[in-house]
Image (tube, rainbow, N blue to C red):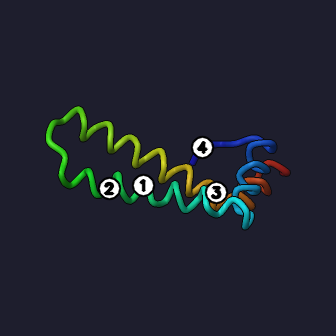
Amino acid sequence: MVRVDERVARCLSTLRSPEMQPLIQFLKDRRQETLERLGDVQGEEMKSRLQGRNLELKDFLEMVEQAEMLYAKTRR
């Protein structure tokens, strides 16, 4: 997990608010589409790109889920 500073942790917490849920759902859908495309892709370059996209989306969504813990870590 990437270390984040207090400001970033607060922003990630904001993304957990109800009004931001459409964005979070969009990112989850985008990740699912990426995973589906990975199964059909031909060529190593495209496969590598999709794997990278999947990993970035996964890491970001995990940081949003763990925002409170990340914020608490910045307060120590």
Q: For marks 3 and 4, give the CA distance.
A: 12 Å
Which one is in front, 68 or 28?
Answer: 28
Q: Residue beneath label 1, please?
A: 31
Q: Is residue 50 above or below residue 34?
A: above
Do tag 4 and tag 2 residues touch (Cβ < 8 Å)? no
For the residue labelled by badge 4, is the local secondary structure a helix, a strand or a loop?
Answer: loop
Do tag 2 and tag 1 residues touch (Cβ < 8 Å)? yes
**Numbered disc in front, either 1 or 4:** 1
Instruction: Give the label on residue 35, or none.
Output: 2
x and y percentages locating residue 9 in the rendered image:
75, 49
Going from N to C along the chain, the mark reached first, 1 or 3, is: 1
Amino acid bearing label 4: Val
Amino acid bearing label 3: Val
x and y percentages locating residue 20 in the rendered image:
69, 59
Residue at the far top: name it.
45
Q: Residue beneath label 3, please?
A: 64
Q: Residue at x 75, y 48 (%)?
A: 11
